[in-house]
Image (spheres, grey):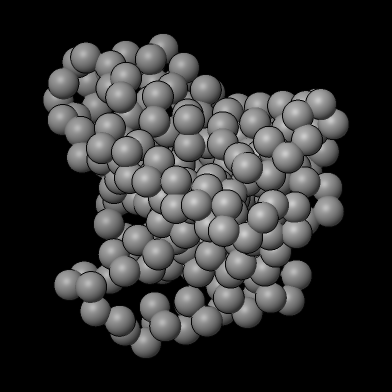
Amino acid sequence: MNNYLFPFLAVVVGIIIARFTKDSKSWNNKLLLSFSGAFLLALTLFELLPEVYNHLETKITGLFIMCGILLQIILELFSKGAEHGHVHVNKKSSSFPWLLFISLCIHSFLEGFSIHDHNDMVYGILIHKIPIATIVSMFLFKSSYDKFQIAAFLIAFAIMTPLGTSISHIWHDSIGNFIHIINAFVIGIFFHISTTILFESSDGHKFNLSKLVTIILGVGIAYLI
């Protein structure tokens, strides 16, 4: 049940934080992004990567991972980097940001395939989605969209990851290795997002002590769980 509940709750928590936080560039949010990037990258390496290599041929696995990186780059052409904490859309525009919405939903749907009963990726996605949901919610709350559009956006965003997990469980026996191929794509997506977060979460791309400690903490906790 937690595999479905935690990703949904992460968006809910992000919405609540956005409601009570006015500054989207707050110090705490940057540190949370750094922690989430390190935590997600470490869990991908510790949990998801070995699992995929156990089921697919080595070189083909690498090819699919590279395709996942390219897929995320393509999605970011439309989302403008919302998956790793950037929203560059005109807040005063009254037209619904369909490209942002669709790319975020595709990203969230695919990451749901990485969650299984025997791994801990749900915790990585939980920590990853909270700051992203916060930043996206802040953008929506400051925009000119009506409340129905904002609610529809956030509800769809919240249910896409549980939907991906549900489909992966239902289809697991019938589509066999295709699940692992999708997971290889997801690894590429996570690699791109987490490394981008780690390099972009400091002003001027400079490492500081608090960020370094946060990254070490994220990796350490991922190793211990």
Q: Position of residue 212 (x, y in %)?
A: 42, 83
Q: Looking at the rendering, which quadrant does residue 142 occupy?
A: top left
60 sits to left or right of 133: right
Quadrant of image for the C terminus: bottom right
- Asked if residue 98 can be seen in this view, the reply is yes
- Residue depicted at x 69% and y 52%: 56
Q: Where is residue 97 in the image (x, y as percent from the top left)?
A: 28, 22
- Compare residues 76 and 54 and report the one nearer the observer: 54
- Residue depicted at x 28% and y 32%: 78
- Residue depicted at x 44% and y 46%: 67
Q: Position of residue 152 (x, y in %)?
A: 46, 17
29 sits to left or right of 115: left
- Asked if residue 18 can be seen in this view, the reply is no
- Residue depicted at x 40% and y 24%: 102
| Vertical placement of residue 32 versus 95, above or below | below
Quadrant of image for the N terminus: top right
